[in-house]
Image (cartoon, rainbow, N blue to C red):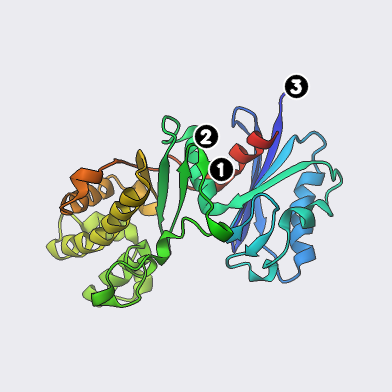
Amino acid sequence: MMKKYLCYDVGGTFVKYAIYAEDATVITKGKFKTRVVDANQFFSDLAKIANEQSDLDAIGISFPGFINPNTGEATRAGALYQLDGLNLVDELKTHLNNVALLVVIENDANCAALAEKLNGNAQDVHDFAVVTLGTGVGGGIVINDHVLHGYQYRAGEFGMMLTDYSEHGEATLHDLASTSALVKLYAQTKRLPVESVSGEQIMAEVDTDSQTRTLVDQWANYVAIAIFNLSVTNAPERILIGGGISQNDKLLPIINAALNRIRFWSDFKCDLKTCAHHNDSGLLGALYLAQQIH
């Protein structure tokens, strides 16, 4: 009989869900608003989807924050701070009709990495990292096909790196290398409202406006520093760049050029690609986890 897995990707605004067959074919998918003012309501919303199914083999959950995948506890639940300290798996099970159903949970950035291992651009490697560029800088590290969690499950917080202390003090990669940082830099330089600028707009101008190209190159230097530091630290076979801006074909050559400006890159160079998955990466990473435990 065909196996079925229910997967959730929990975000600050919406919870996306999908039921997958064992070959990753989507049987059904949808989303609902994230309601966390009342924790009981949050878990009831999740359980409602599961309780409508009678033949699930396992549940996989992609969740923000510092997540202990062994126990299901959220030391910190990211933007969903109302759930800090709760055992998310145990809480969900109290609302399930089938309390014996296997449930596994993992940090959302780690799920993005596992999605690439499942059926993306990391299927052929065992050691790799994912760096996501968006509102902030996130990521995950996989060594010997296992996520590196680190002490208190805080590994992979690339966005907190300090990379230019003398010039920017304690400004982190969130402040310097995220897509939001690029948008802010562009808006300040062009004297535009930040809300009127998008990453897509900037990348569209990069080959036609010299000022824009200079700004993008400056920003790409910080992205390259993050990639270089990861390569020096972990020696991955491949580093994948994710986030909406990574879907632009112009990005990878710009980052490669920035890396080649680093004198020692040739000694620590690894394969650099973009992620295959974007909007569904959390769901697919949760699927990978669910398949592993069942």
**Residue pictured at 84% horizontal, 54% vertical:** 94
**Distance (Cα) linking label 3 and label 2:** 22 Å
> From the image, which quarter does the N terminus lie in?
top right
Could one spot residue 183 in this view of the protein? yes
Query: Badges 1 and 3: C-beta atoms under 8 Å apart?
Result: no
Q: Which of marks 1 and 3 is in front?
A: 1
> Residue 136: x percent and y percent?
42, 64
The amino acid on which the numbered mark 3 sits, given as a three-letter code, is Met
Residue 76 in the image: above or below residue 25? below
Label 2 CA crowd tier, 10 Å (few <14, some 14–19, many 20+): some
Task: Name which quarter of the figure residue 27 lies in.
Answer: top right
Q: Which of 275 and 228 is in front in this view?
A: 228
The amino acid on which the numbered mark 1 sits, given as a three-letter code, is Gly
* Residue bearing mark 3: 1
Q: Is mark 2 on a helix, strand or loop?
A: helix
> Residue 98: x percent and y percent?
85, 43
Q: Nearer the viewer, residue 259 or 232?
A: 232
Q: Residue furthest right?
A: 97
* Residue bearing mark 1: 285
Q: Which of marks 3 and 2 is nearer the N terminus?
A: 3
Label 3 CA crowd tier, 10 Å (few <14, some 14–19, many 20+): few
